[in-house]
């Protein structure tokens, strides 16, 4: 019998439900893409292929080779070394490619930000559910006469949900302390280096005075 099929009705399949949810989110995001954005992203995908890289190498090499060997065969060169026309074409192509890539990364960055927000919301919800489950288990343990009642400080701490603002403030404080420690260490290092240089200069001066 397959999952989700049986005589008592369809059973929920969390794996397929999660996959369907992810696919639905992907389809919604794809449907919201502007036609111009879709063309730009298709162009970005085409530019990112190895064939395009090889094509650039072959095209540039042939252009340089043809214009370098043309005078040997008595032919007129279209772009004499150092190949100003080629440099202009490469610069224009680089500008256009950079713009196309930035347009693609801009939409992908917004999509990634939405996914991060979703992950954060799911993590907070999971943390709240876990705290609630621990609280219910502790309450059940206290109500069961057959179980020895004892104080579990760790369980009591885990029943409290974490405030994201407090976590963010703690991280900022910790990072601030780390930056201050690094700055202090840098100052001490500079002072040690300066003292070492002064000591070395004093030794050199003493040797010069002794030799004089």
Image (cartoon, rainbow, N blue to C red):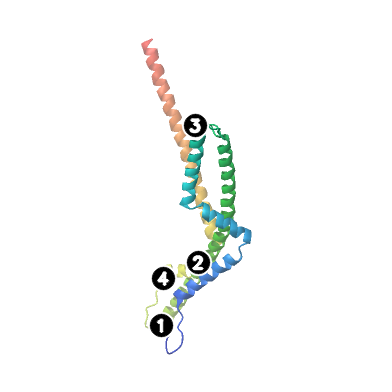
| Residue underneath mark 3 | 73
Q: Which mark is residue 152?
A: 4
| Residue underneath mark 2 | 123
Numbered disc 4: secondary structure: loop
Numbered disc 1: secondary structure: loop
Q: Nearer the viewer, residue 37 or 72?
A: 72
Q: Earlier in the sequence, mark 3 or mark 2?
A: 3
Tally of marks: 4
Q: Earlier in the sequence, mark 4 or mark 2?
A: 2
In percent of width and height, residue 199 lies at 41, 24
Q: Earlier in the sequence, mark 3 or mark 4?
A: 3
In percent of width and height, residue 143 lies at 43, 82
| Residue underneath mark 1 | 144
Vertical position of residue 152 compared to residue 97: above or below: below
Q: Residue at x 39, y 14 (%)?
A: 208
Q: Residues within 10 Å of mark 3 (few under 14, many from 20)?
A: few
Numbered disc 3: secondary structure: helix
Q: Is residue 199 visible?
A: yes
In percent of width and height, residue 129 lies at 49, 72
Discs 1/3, front: 3
Q: What is the distance, in whole Å, between disc 3 and disc 2 at their CAs? A: 72 Å
Vertical position of residue 104 compared to residue 124: above or below: above
Numbered disc 2: secondary structure: helix
Q: What is the distance, in whole Å, between disc 1 and disc 4 at their CAs? A: 16 Å
Q: Residues within 10 Å of mark 2 (few under 14, many from 20)?
A: few
In percent of width and height, residue 80 lies at 55, 32
């Amino acid at each position: 019998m397959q999952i989700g099929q049986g005589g008592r009705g369809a059973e929920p399949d969390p794996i397929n439900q999660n996959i369907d949810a992810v696919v639905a989110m992907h389809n919604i995001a794809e449907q919201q893409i502007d036609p111009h954005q879709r063309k730009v992203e298709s162009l970005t995908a085409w530019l990112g292929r190895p064939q395009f890289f090889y094509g650039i190498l072959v095209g540039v090499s042939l252009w340089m080779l043809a214009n370098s060997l043309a005078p040997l065969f008595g032919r007129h060169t279209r772009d004499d070394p150092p190949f100003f026309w080629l440099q202009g074409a490469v610069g224009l192509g680089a500008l256009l490619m950079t713009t196309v890539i930035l347009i693609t990364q801009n939409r992908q960055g917004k999509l990634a930000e939405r996914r991060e927000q979703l992950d954060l919301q799911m993590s907070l919800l999971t943390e709240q559910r876990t705290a609630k489950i621990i609280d219910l288990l502790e309450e059940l343990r206290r109500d069961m006469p057959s179980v020895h009642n004892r104080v579990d400080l760790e369980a009591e701490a885990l029943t409290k949900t974490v405030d994201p603002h407090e976590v963010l403030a703690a991280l900022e404080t910790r990072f601030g302390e780390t930056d201050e420690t690094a700055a202090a260490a840098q100052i001490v290092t500079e002072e040690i280096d300066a003292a070492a240089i002064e000591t070395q200069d004093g030794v050199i001066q003493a040797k010069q005075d002794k030799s004089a």
